[in-house]
Image: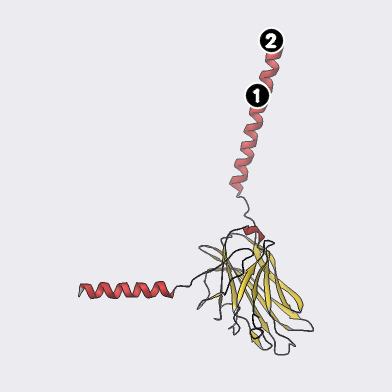
Amino acid sequence: MQFKLKYIVATIALVGVVGQAQATALVANVPTSSVETVASDFGGTLLDSVSTLINNVSYNGTARAAVYSTATGLDFYYQFTNNASSQNGIERFSAFDFSSLGASVVDVYQTGAAFGMFVTGTEASDYADRTLAGVIGFNFVPNGDSKIQPGTTSFIQIIRTNATNYQPGNFGLLDGIGDNAEGFSPAAAVPEASANFMMLVGLGVIGLIGSRRIKKQDQHLRFN
């Protein structure tokens, strides 16, 4: 009985490990072969969100972006709904500016499950890429059939980072004609007030030491 119980527990644990999402690591100038699909979002606390209406001669629709705070850092979410009245599909969208992360690896995922401001997605991205200039792109057209066609909505694209601060960013859309929506991006860490105070104290101490040295040198010269 004990052996059977241990076997069942071990089996459940193994299933849990297998069921966990495998991150798609994204490094600069190395496109991924795919983007990992997960069953749902990663939760956390919503910090900010925005919807932008897009309307040009090629396509029109709604771009959605949000940033969530989690135990591991900030997660950035992007989605586009292409209205049925559009002339063309979207083959790529991009997020900017992620240059503050430097060379640190970010993980990308996607989900078709609706949550918060995001709606159910029907079109999965095929691969992602990243440049040293801070652009992270999601591509929907390896064979021309997986565009975000008129009347469809992209899967929600997720960028998981170790950032702790965010700022306004850019959400770019492309299909022959490029367009821009509002988005969010990581921001460089802001020093805490206590750190600034300690730095000023340190500079004051250095100045005091320098002043004392000058006084000692003056006294030495007078006596000699």
User: In the current view of this chain or complex, which residue is farthest to the left?
Assistant: 1
Give the left or right position of residue 110, taking residue 99 as reference: left
Rendering coords of residue 157 (x, y %): 60, 74
Q: Which mark is residue 113?
A: none
Identify the residue shown where x is 74% and y is 84%: 59
* The quarter of the displayed image where residue 165 is located: bottom right
Q: Nearer the viewer, residue 143 or 82?
A: 143
Rendering coords of residue 117 (x, y %): 61, 78
Crowding around mark 2 (Cα neighbors within 10 Å: few <14, some 14 to 19, many 20+) is: few
Rendering coords of residue 213 (x, y %): 66, 23
Location of residue 35 with respect to 152 vertically, above or below: above
Identify the residue shown where x is 75% and y is 76%: 179
Classify mark 2: helix, strand or loop.
helix
The three-letter amino acid code for the residue at tag 1 is: Arg
Identify the residue shown where x is 63% and y is 28%: 209
Q: Nearer the viewer, residue 5 or 70?
A: 5
Rendering coords of residue 1 (x, y %): 20, 75
- Name the residue beneath numbered marker 2: 223
Location of residue 218 with respect to 153 vertically, above or below: above
Give the left or right position of residue 119, taking residue 83 as reference: left
The three-letter amino acid code for the residue at tag 2 is: Phe
Classify mark 1: helix, strand or loop.
helix
- Name the residue beneath numbered marker 1: 212
Q: Are marks 2 and 1 in contact (CB under 8 Å)?
A: no
